[in-house]
Amino acid sequence: MRGFLKPFAFIAFFLPFFSFSLWTGEWQGEAEMHSYTLPASKGILYVSYTQTGVQLVLNKAQYKTKYTQQEWGPETYEIRNGDLFDESKKIGEVSENHISIFREALTPQGKYYFETHVTKTGEHSVSYDENWFTQKKPVYSLKGVLEVVPSQKLP
């Protein structure tokens, strides 16, 4: 009986370490930004996440077109039972196949709200959907289908 239980004890001990890397990697691909005051623009979107048992970190995100480049991150969120927290405020959820974040941002122009959804759509791909808006109107959206950066692909 003891020999029979050893593999289960091994799996029970190490499984948490393997399951926390669900969102660790880099993705990149074509994306399109729609501004509600300017023409749509196409560019390259890059995102890098690291997930541990207690944190989800957006290490870096970058949207680059022929004329402009925007970069953001790092952003660190605490994970509690699949919910994401920024300090003590729940701002989203994370699961094996989906990240969902809803936040507020105060700027000199006023308060903005943004929501981000990242969904695994295949073994090496994700869809990225980010929307910024005020209480009265949408400001912009950024959408794309991204592939794992080649150095991150599994053999």
Image: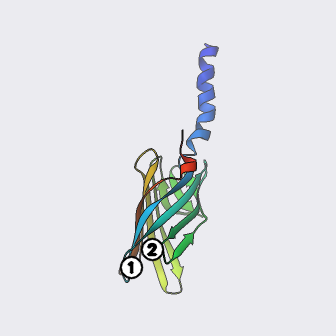
Q: Mark 1 touching mark 2, by CB under 8 A? A: yes
Residue 26 percent location from the top left of the image: 55, 54
Amino acid marked by disc 1: Gln
Label 2: which residue? 113
Where's residue 30, x and y in %? 43, 62
Dot 1 or dot 2: first in sequence order is 2
| Front residue of 86 and 18 | 18
Q: Which residue is drawn at 49% across and 86% down?
A: 109
Which residue is disc 1 drawn over?
A: 135
SS category of the residue bearing label 2:
strand
Estimate how packed mark 1 is, as few (under 14), some (14 to 19) or many (20 or more) residues with alpha carbons within 10 Å. few
Q: Which residue is found at the position 59% from the left and 16% from the top?
A: 4
Which residue sits furthest top? 1
Most extreme residue toward the front, as rendered?
A: 66
Residue 149 location, x and y as percent?
A: 53, 53
* Alpha carbon separation for disc pair 1 and 2: 8 Å
Q: What residue type is labelled 2?
A: Tyr
